[in-house]
Image (cartoon, grey):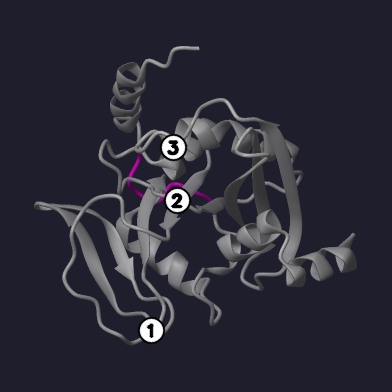
Amino acid sequence: MVLDTQQLRKEQTSQASKIILQDEFPSLKLIGGADVGFEQQGSITRAVIVVLSWPQLELVEYQIARIPTQLPYIPGLLSFREVPGLMAAWEKIQHKPELVLVDGQGIAHPRRFGVACHFGLQANVATIGVAKSRLCGDAAELGDSPESVQPLMAGENQLGWVLRSKKRCKPLYVSPGYKVGFSSSLSWVKQCLKGYRLPEPTRFADGIASNRTFFKRMNEKIS
């Protein structure tokens, strides 16, 4: 299969025009987290969506979808690689959340269409991108104290936020995905911090995707 990467980039630019950057979701009862990993040397996409109660942040449901990986890793086009798996997991979710925190970029992307935007638009659910590394944009130097924050900018345009979620940890890059505004995207992530680097929804998704021991024990209790 020959990939037309130029066409995929054009599609991102086109789809980015559909992104809504203001809060358009009902009052929260459930909040989700989404993460994607790969198995068998990248040939299998392993996508996880978790659903937590709000505001208790207790696990309600999670689903794992494993599908053949459809695209190789191409910088800037990651969402085309990850969203098919996320949609497969989303279709299995019985308790749909009103808001999903996605491990990855929202509009803090060269064409303003990261995986949180792509997934939110396709699933028609409000999303926030919570990335562990910066893809684009600049910010002033961040303070060392927890919850230090600076706007992430591209020239005069804001892309999101750089947030120190935990002392002595690398910052997170928070950006709106779909149907969420700038200030609320930061507020929701901060409300989901419980002493770890990652907010609870993506921490749960990451832990389940990685089969970490704590989450394996936790899952055994609820299964």
Give whichever of discs 1 and 3 has the lower sequence position: 3
Q: Is residue 37 above or below residue 195?
A: above
Q: Do the residues labelled 1 and 3 touch (CB within 8 Å)?
A: no
Question: Can residue 123 be seen in this snapshot?
Answer: no
- Is the residue marked by circle 1 packed among few (<14), some (14-19), or many (20+) residues within 10 Å? some
Give whichever of discs 2 and 3 has the lower sequence position: 3
Give the residue pinned by disc 2: 104
Amino acid residing under circle 3: Leu
The answer to which of 221 and 158 lies nearer the viewer is 221
Residue extending farthest front: 41
Residue 146, disc: 1
In the image, residue 206 lies in the stretch drawn in magenta: no
Q: Are marks 2 and 3 in contact (CB under 8 Å)?
A: yes
Amino acid residing under circle 2: Gly
Secondary structure at numbered mark 3: helix
Give the residue pinned by disc 3: 78
Q: Quadrant of residue 220?
A: bottom right
Span of residues in magenta: 20-26
